[in-house]
Image: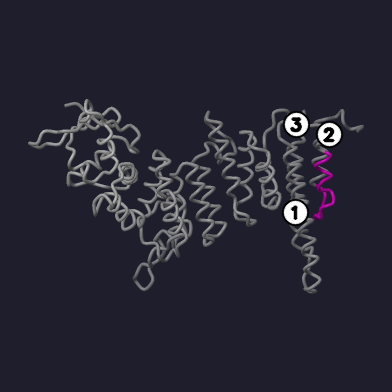
Amino acid sequence: MGDSIRYVATELATDVVVNVGDVKFYLHKFPLLSKSEHLQKLVASTNDENGDEILIQEIPGGPAAFEICAKFCYGMAVTLNAYNVVAARCAAEYLEMYESVEKGNLVYKIDIFLNSSIFRSWKDSIIILQTTKSLLPWAEELKLVSHCLDSIASKACMDTNMVEWSYTYSRKKLPSENGKDPLWNGVRKPQVVPRDWWVEDLCELQIDLFKRAITTIIKKGRVSGDVIGEALIAYTLRRLPGSSKGIVLGSDVTKHRSLAETIVRLLPAEKGSVPCGFMLRLLRAAILLECEETGRNELMRRIGQQLDEATMADLLIQSPTTKYNVDIVQGLVEKFVAYEQNARSALLVDSDFQENRSPKSAPDASKAVVAKLVEGYLAEIARDPNLPLSKFVHLAETVSGFGRPSHDGLYRAIDMYLKEHPGDEQE
């Protein structure tokens, strides 16, 4: 018989046909009705003409999930694993295979299997979370999604000394983390589990589930911001083509825009939790993808706090009218100035209580670094024949008051600009 027909090998003639999608199941009423309250209702409501045929179209998991439930009704061996257990659980719920119908029914058995096996496994928890996507809203209403997320988050938050399961980790490790450190007294030290051991496995999730997993981990409050940052970086590099170079490849703009906006919203609040260079590449992608202005402004604010960590190459963001987007860099420098002013005010207030502290040393050092950075940027953009003098001057003036050993870099940039734009000398 073809793939669209299923039957039980038995001497007893079948007395009911269950249509699930395009598959016909030739079965027997007694084993089915003894465990499924929903099938009892369907059989009772059918008319005499079609009393031996039942139509089930909306069962979650389709024919494959129904077949698992039917086998259970017949007492046959059922193989459950991370790939099919959510579908089977949702189908059992649909069929109302409860303890009130028969003790030891399928809903009860699957719940025990989930709690005693699947949710205790790191890899299986991620696999079943992925399977829930095609089983909504059932998986959500049965709290299977939330149980998966809690299982994943609880493991990610555990002390690394307690991690005993396998995980994916292909990034560069310290010698003590990859087992290549020298032997100590002839005995190799046990492998050290890195704090971000869970990151790569979570990169397998689609963005909506990844977001919920990261949010659940953050809510538990036991993972530091820099590790969350590592997760966001790894996910972006994996899922946003070209993001490592600050460009966006591929044609699915809507999908990539949603991803970039989600990553921005997930950035940890702690300053330094994500490198400035990564945020600048993310900003480039956000501009290319025309992401929402609120998210871009927040990203610029975060970059401004750490602008002294940027390189000149990080700032070379392309523009449709000029070679480089000077307006964005101007905005970043202004965000930096605003942040430094607030930081200085906070230090001055604090210094009233701590006389020995120098409230200006750290901000002044950062300003000197940013001044040098902007001077290098001005020298680079000075070669652009389409760059208006007003933008060049405005950016130069923004850092003119920043303390630095010398202003030679600024003078060189001005000289280069005038050579490239001889008509602007009078101005």
Would you call the spot at circle 3 few (<14 residues within 10 Å), some (14-19), or many (20 or more)? some
Closer to the camera: disc 3 or disc 1? 1
Q: Quadrant of residue 25?
A: top left
Crowding around mark 2 (Cα neighbors within 10 Å: few <14, some 14 to 19, many 20+) is some
290 vs 119, left or right, is: right
- The amino acid type found where label 1 is placed reads Tyr
Task: Please name the residue that numbered disc 2 is placed on.
Answer: 389
Percent position (x, y) of residue 116?
Answer: 31, 58
**Looking at the picture, how far across and down is residue 105, in whole percent?**
25, 51
Q: Quadrant of residue 166?
A: bottom left
- What is the secondary structure assignment of the residue under circle 2? helix
Considering only order in the chain, which callout, 1 or 3, is on the residue closer to the N terminus?
A: 1
Between label 3 and label 2, give the one nearer the viewer: 2
Callout in the foreground (1, 2): 1
Residue at the disc numbered 3? 384
- State the separation of the CA atoms marked 1 and 2: 27 Å
Q: Cα distance, mark 3 to mark 2?
A: 11 Å
Label 3 with label 2: CB-CB less than 8 Å: no
Residue shown at the point (17%, 41%) measured from the top left? 30
Please, what is the three-letter code of the amino acid marked with disc 3?
Asp
Q: Residue furthest right?
A: 426
Image height check: is 176 above or below 303?
below
Tell me residue 63's x, y (percent). 28, 35
Mark 1, secondary structure of its residue: helix
| Label 1 sits on residue | 339
Q: Earlier in the sequence, mark 1 or mark 2?
A: 1
> What residue span does the magenta drawing correspond to?
393-408
Point out the tag, 3 or 2, that comes first from the N-terminus.
Answer: 3
Q: Are marks 1 and 2 in contact (CB under 8 Å)?
A: no
